[in-house]
Image (tube, rainbow, N blue to C red):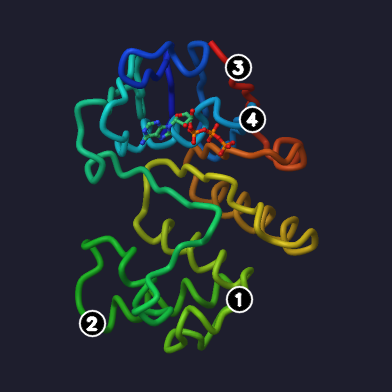
Amino acid sequence: MTLEIDNLTLRFRDRPALFAPLTLRIAPGEVGTVMGPSGVGKSTLLDAIAGHLAHGFTLTGDVRLNGQSVLRLPPERRRIGLVFQDAVLFPHLSVGDNLAFGLTPDIRGRAARANAVEQALIRAGLAGLAPRDPATLSGGQRARVALMRALLAEPMALLMDEPFSKLDANLRSEMRSFAFAHIRERDIPALVVTHDPADAEVANGPKFLLSVA
Ligand SMILES: Nc1ncnc2c1ncn2[C@@H]1O[C@H](COP(=O)(O)OP(=O)(O)OP(=O)(O)O)[C@@H](O)[C@H]1O
């Protein structure tokens, strides 16, 4: 899978475009990074790629996965994963059920699904934590569960919005390596919005700076 963005701009109602047209190409297994001033439209850019653009915004340009435009597809058919700063987990579901929520429907049957969840927990270094309430996990553990849940959906591309910014310095670098290694292994393109230059340094993909239009 390759993610391509071609001359993309975003506008809210009749206001001027948020940022100067953006063109980028991220190859499979590459992590691209996007930086830029606060309010320039970084989070809105990710919403636009995933197909969750809020009412009132219009997009010009194109977003392609493997050469095919996804703009006419609803979000669920784009199969683009999103991971946010807050590692949002469903508070009323156990850790295991949070992960099961991410699983593709292709994995059928109770035992097969439970096994896929347990494998994901093992890979995240969280073996045995399936029954736990998300509120009882540390910030770093929650971040790993949120990433694994996004990956269990077998996304065609992964978008991350300041995914490590809430973690303390040690955990941040550990999580960064963990996330980037999983992206490389899945061979999917990823785009990370960040304010942290270290994310861009460690990422193996192209770096973009959004500037005000
Ligand atoms: N639903 C909305 N309705 C109207 N304006 C919005 C909406 N969502 C975002 N905006 C505006 O669009 C612009 C871009 O917001 P966005 O959150 O994408 O910026 P950002 O670059 O991610 O900022 P930060 O780095 O501070 O997180 C801002 O001016 C914001 O106020």
In the image, what residue type sits under mark 2?
Arg
In the image, what residue type sits under mark 3?
Ser
Residue beneath disc 2: 110
Q: Secondary structure at mark 3?
A: loop
Q: Secondary structure at mark 1?
A: loop
Residue furthest to the front in view is 14
Rendered location of residue 181, percent (x, y): 62, 53
Q: Is residue 74 above or below residue 66?
A: below
Circles 1 and 2 in contact, beta carbons < 8 Å: no
| Quarter of the image with the N terminus in it | top left
Q: Secondary structure at mark 4?
A: strand
Rendered location of residue 212, percent (x, y): 57, 15
CA separation in Å, label 1 and label 3? 39 Å
Residue beneath disc 1: 125
Few, some or many C-alpha atoms within 10 Å of disc 2 (few <14, some 14-19, many ≥20)?
few
Residue beneath disc 4: 35
Q: Which of the pair 182/141 is nearer the observer?
A: 141
Q: Residue at x 73, y 64 (%)?
A: 171
